[in-house]
Amino acid sequence: MKILVTGSAGFIGSALSIRLLQRGDTVIGIDNHNDYYDTSLKEDRLNLFIDNDKYSHNRISLEDYKSVKNIFKKEKIDVVVNLAAQAGVRYSLENPVSYVNSNILGFTHLLEECRYNNVNHLVYASTSSVYGLNTKMPYSVKDSANHPVSFYAATKKANELMAHTYSHLYKLPTTGLRFFTVYGPWGRPDMALFKFTNSILKKERITIFNNGKHKRDFTYIDDIISGIEHVIDNPPSGNKKWSGNDPEANSSTAPWRIFNIGNNKKTDLMDYISEIEKELEMNADKEFLPLQLGDVPDTHADVEELISEFNYKPNTSIKDGIKEFIKWYKIYYKINQ
């Protein structure tokens, strides 16, 4: 297939692009290389596959509708995987407009081009953050997710609703993927594992929010990519009927669906930090702080829908995942410990 991957120099986007190229797909990449974090990391990810004959790269923003239209006009795209977004819960408190531009306007441009160019399937990133104030665990796609507590999460929930509208009106097959705390080699510097590892190695204090009482469904990058790959190859038909507490969704015949992608286990944050300390053979200097504004105490994914449809089995343990990340980190930053 010819697959458009947005955010192709990002953490998940680069890993997915490599997987798709390995299996023989043609990949059209889009990434604006913004400076939300160190751009050299994005360039180095991209260098892993940019010379592949079946890959072409476009340094544009999804907000640039003319450039987006030109790509769809030039290429006969079968599937779009939208992983480009302004990420981060905490940054959305500081700069909400950037989330509107990237996550709402940019996504609208993709929807329009998928509609007019007969794309077979639009797969897009959502987030576990949409569950917001939901206290029922584990989080299920059948449960309400209508009270997000960060603007980032609100934009992602909006994407799900926008996708349903296009699926309903134009029969565009869409699948939203609610990612649960993705980690692993080549990860983002603003995420916990990267920040903790960096600070511990530099013998700097790490800040631990919610007084260390967080529980998270940490999901290794390879397990995420496996889930995405299954979804790409199997677009929704519109025959799926939801069970649960949403009668409107139950009656919808739109080719639209939502999946959780997580490890299906929740881990105490302090246990996660302990594994990092063991792997580094160093103790962290810890500062405990209250729950951060816009954050949620716990996340836990119910992935029954993915299991039943695709026999999805996340199988990377926290211990093994952290080990792989730290091995990569030391090689990438040339750390001899």
Image (spheres, grey):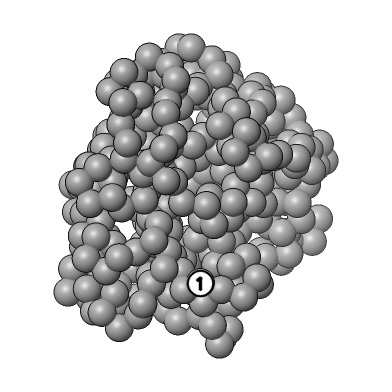
Q: Nearer the viewer, residue 265 or 332?
A: 265
Which quadrant of the structure image shows residue 281?
top right
Q: Nearer the viewer, residue 184 or 312?
A: 312
Does dot 1 land on a helix, a strand or a loop? Answer: loop
Vertical position of residue 241 compared to residue 236: above or below: above
Query: Which residue is at a point 55% across and 67% down the rendered structure image?
Result: 17
Residue 179 pos. (x, y %): 50, 40
Q: Nearer the viewer, residue 111 or 267?
A: 111
Which quadrant of the structure image shows residue 238?
top left
Query: Which residue is at a point 64% across and 29% down the rendered structure image?
Result: 264
Q: Is residue 165 left or right of residue 24?
A: left
Residue at the outermost front position: 239
Query: Which residue is at a point 48% across and 12% down the rendered structure image?
Result: 136
Quadrant of the image for the C terminus?
A: bottom right
Vertical position of residue 99 compared to residue 17: above or below: above
Query: Which residue is at a point 28% across and 46% down the rendered structure image?
Result: 167
Residue 312 pos. (x, y %): 66, 40
Q: Is residue 162 visible?
A: no
* Residues packed near mark 1 inside 10 Å, few (<14), some (14 to 19) or many (20 plus): few
Counting the numbered discs, the total is 1
Q: Is residue 189 left or right of residue 242?
A: right
Q: Amino acid at mark 1?
A: Met
Q: Is residue 129 visible?
A: yes
Which residue position is annotated with label 1?
Answer: 1
Residue 324 pos. (x, y %): 75, 51
